[in-house]
Image (cartoon, coloured by chain):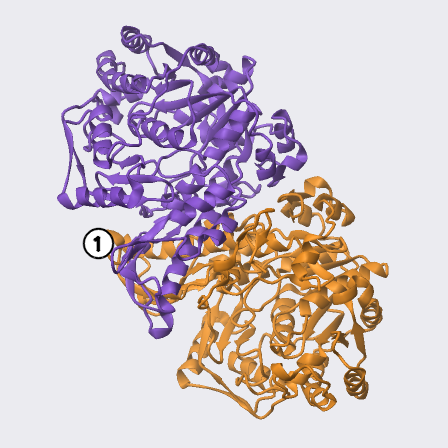
Chain colours: A purple, B orange
Amino acid sequence: MTSDIQIARAATKRPIAEIAEGLGLGVDQILPYGHDKAKITHDAIATLTDRPMGRLVLVTAISPTPAGEGKTTTTVGLGDALNRIGKRATICIREASLGPNFGMKGGAAGGGRAQIVPMEEMNLHFTGDFHAITSAHNLLAAMIDNHIYWGNALDIDTRRITWRRVMDMNDRALRDVALGLGGVANGFVRQSGFDITVASEVMAILCLASDLGDLQERLGRIVIGYSRDRQPVTARDLKADGAMTVLLKDALQPNLVQTLENNPALVHGGPFANIAHGCNSVTATRTALHLSDYVVTEAGFGADLGAEKFLDIKCRLAELSPSAVVLVATIRALKMNGGVAKADLGGEDVAAVTRGCANLGRHIENLRGFGLPVVVALNHFDGDSEAEVAALQTYCGHHGVKAVIARHWAQGGAGAEDLAREVVALSEGEVDFHTLYPDSMPLWQKIETICTRIYRASHAEAAAGIREQLETWEEAGYGHLPVCIAKTQYSFSTNPALHGAPEGHIVPVREVRLNAGAGFIVAICGQIMTMPGLPRQPAAESIGIDEDGWIEGLF
Amino acid sequence: MTSDIQIARAATKRPIAEIAEGLGLGVDQILPYGHDKAKITHDAIATLTDRPMGRLVLVTAISPTPAGEGKTTTTVGLGDALNRIGKRATICIREASLGPNFGMKGGAAGGGRAQIVPMEEMNLHFTGDFHAITSAHNLLAAMIDNHIYWGNALDIDTRRITWRRVMDMNDRALRDVALGLGGVANGFVRQSGFDITVASEVMAILCLASDLGDLQERLGRIVIGYSRDRQPVTARDLKADGAMTVLLKDALQPNLVQTLENNPALVHGGPFANIAHGCNSVTATRTALHLSDYVVTEAGFGADLGAEKFLDIKCRLAELSPSAVVLVATIRALKMNGGVAKADLGGEDVAAVTRGCANLGRHIENLRGFGLPVVVALNHFDGDSEAEVAALQTYCGHHGVKAVIARHWAQGGAGAEDLAREVVALSEGEVDFHTLYPDSMPLWQKIETICTRIYRASHAEAAAGIREQLETWEEAGYGHLPVCIAKTQYSFSTNPALHGAPEGHIVPVREVRLNAGAGFIVAICGQIMTMPGLPRQPAAESIGIDEDGWIEGLF
């Protein structure tokens, strides 16, 4: 069998200037990075704003399992298929983080015949966006300690600094550190730590900013901690917002690459899908919409987390309105949601598929609750039996949703033409999209609404201090913000072992965080790791350059 | 008066592909980064190795003073002038570090009419080389702590780990930190710290590596610390060398940009000039030599530090042989070396110029000691009086060296044509270049040789432990390495206030470090800061994007 990386290396890439030309962009409207990557310039984007926008299609999935769902693969396959049936379609996905590749092997953007290239570079430095985010984040951190060192005119309480530092590396030794040791010249000792770059609020901000002006506004609003009299201290108070914007100036421009079938893809930004909203940048999505009939994008994790945040955070803040949702499922993942262990996925098990469909059905109901038309894409595997596929289709039929078999992994865009036609049909219908809750709803009620309406919990619970914290933020003018819930992606509940469609559980909120710059409140429900570690045998040990100059061990 | 940045912004840049074409490089031999920067590919470089090499001209300077000497400006002006008189000349200089720009204002590459562009980007992320170095350095750091976490099979002594972490940021709070706090899951607590990226041994390695294979060899030789039984532990022992090479693959390729007069410049690498050798990369210099009749390059600080390291470290390891040396001086800097304070530089002071020439004369003698022909370039300032200039020329005449007045700052290459003609005349003569000491000399004797022959000290001194450390390294097979002395750049002695040409002083060696990967021993003589801090009012506070989209406050 040909591996993803073999397929990617055999790709016949077109020069990126030609891909840009296909979008109607001239050579002076892009900044090339090598011959197969480019950024679309701020100037070019500014000329597009009056153009009509194409239709936005969200690809999301059932609750993830170790069996894999192929959400990105389906996003890419659908984009290629839409182009094949004569629509001008652009794909928008997130960038990969560099650090984790040195722990576990890196991943393709897509898989099989439905991939985005250049794969190696997208897993390494790409166009440097994440490095720029690291720099901007850490400049603010350095300015905080420097401000304190030179007299602390803002009276920052060193015990209440919430702004940590970041690095795009899996480095557990940095999770919790004491800074400023070594005496007077090095400042005041305090405890802090590092997160991985994708967990930075700067990443979320870059992904939600509409332009450079809005970027600077949002950066300025970042709350880095509190003064001795408990008032929030912002990046603007430290005069860091301008320099941070300068560091992010190039990074805000979307990255243009291509699929194996030479269709355009914007790969830009990559916020966490738990403590952040998990979607590619607003600039990429809006730019693509101005340049295309259809834009196919995806959201992180399953639809309970990813789609909810895409709709309630990204679409709300960026005033986007999707035309259709593709809900990806695989027979294998349905079986795991139906209680089958990964080791036992080999044989046919129709009953397990049917049991797993409860998870699918819950997601369908939720998505329809947003007023959106839904199609189920069955990402087809060779081992899927006809009876198992029929069980899925029967279930979907009973719920008034089409389940379309998609074979893009094996066949590329040609394998997803049926899906593409269904997406076009759905998109051309009337859509009455609305978010789950209004801006004006109190923060705790927003949390409860997501927990009861999407996760189907009986209720959410939190210590009094957390509820008081939310009220304090409401009084400080942050009550209008949407809520981003960080919880396990493996279950509707907070128990990752609870597959299927649990209900009536309780969602405990352990901690709340204010992301005033990004523009959302984070409610943490469970253990969320923001700085991964390397495994016993890190992938890095096998990574190198082979005799032919190819990178080995990265995939 | 027009500022450097105004001149730079008004530059008529040619597309970088045209600059490459002028060097004989096709579009497929470069990787563009935007329209005004490119990397020359490894493949292109591999095709050049059989070509003859042009002549290498080193630009160095008298001992630096706050008055400034204009070494880079002269390098650029000379490069432009050589092109004007019909020679195919390429300039090779170092890249700027990002972090310090947020403390003090950033600098141009050159100045006046003798600059390299694009100035803004060269002061920001440029082509991402330093970010790649940061990643590679910190991957190794993460792998060290991870190795210990998972059982420490190599028996690394956590008290004897010398490999710190790096960040391209002025952040004093990171100089000295305790890592691994927070309990079992975060590893073992130990004290460590961060240096600024340019101080990383990976930077020195990137700048001395001849190709990807040599890069990996050198990375593998890095000694990260010692085991409990005092044996060196290397990056290869940790299997980190392959992955580090992958992270540095693109960064090893030299960056092509252009002067204001559209002549080619390779701007690549930027190691510290105290704890490292302070020169641009070997790949850039060798590539430029294969593509040009003349390559004009510079070394850090004054000739005692910069030129000595360029010759004894870079030329030795890369088997390069310069054809001529340009020693840059200004009337103002000579006066300061003659004892005048910066505030008093306004009026004519011929006697001070003559006194300051002692410093110049010492550098001339030293450079001739390497068997190299020398010309003095007087980087002309408007305020220089005729009598002051005459005093310099008289002094040089007595020492058998030409002093050429160069007006490139005001006039561009046209102002340095006389200098260019003199450089050509010198370069065409017989040159008998030799390093200061042979590889086989014992390490301590190498230190003493530099101190007595170049710094004119009576002797060097060190505690017994340091001498023993050097002997241990000799026994371990590192005795053949050259020595890199880290001391103040403001004096031949270790006292920065001692201007002119002091002699008979003592050089105390406080510490020695093994850079087994880069391939030199560092002898630290004085306080060397490897992680700067931000000032009370950091430049970052004034940096932003103005209404026309220009970056303000960076310069």
Q: How many labels does the image show?
A: 1
Place of residue B27 in the rendered image (x, y in percent of width and height, measured from the top left): 71, 40
Q: Callout 1: residue from which chain? A: B
* Secondary element at tag 1: helix
Q: Which residue is drawn at the image coordinates 58% and 49% (left, top)?
A: B127
B58 lies above or below B525: above
Residue neighbourhood size for the residue with mark 1, other residues' Cα within 10 Å, grouped as few (<14), some (14–19), many (≥20): few
Residue B286 seen in the current view = no
Place of residue B499 in the rendered image (x, y in percent of width and height, measured from the top left): 60, 86
Which quadrant would the N terminus of chain B be assigned to in this image? bottom right
B505 lies above or below A218: below
Place of residue A518 in the rendered image (x, y in percent of width and height, measured from the top left): 38, 41
Identified by mark 1, the residue type is: Val
Occupied quadrant, residue A207: top left
Would residue A288 be found to the left or right of residue A494 on screen? right
Residue B314 seen in the current view = yes
Would residue A86 be found to the left or right of residue A111 on screen? right
Depth check, front residue: B227 or A291: A291
Q: Which residue is drawn at the image coordinates 50% and 73% (left, top)?
A: B522
Place of residue B290 in the rendered image (x, y in percent of width and height, measured from the top left): 74, 55
Depth check, front residue: A222 or A249: A222
Q: Which residue is drawn at the image coordinates 61% and 51% (left, top)?
A: B253
Which quadrant would the C terminus of chain B be assigned to in this image? bottom right
Pointer 1 residue: B184
Depth check, front residue: A209 or A183: A209
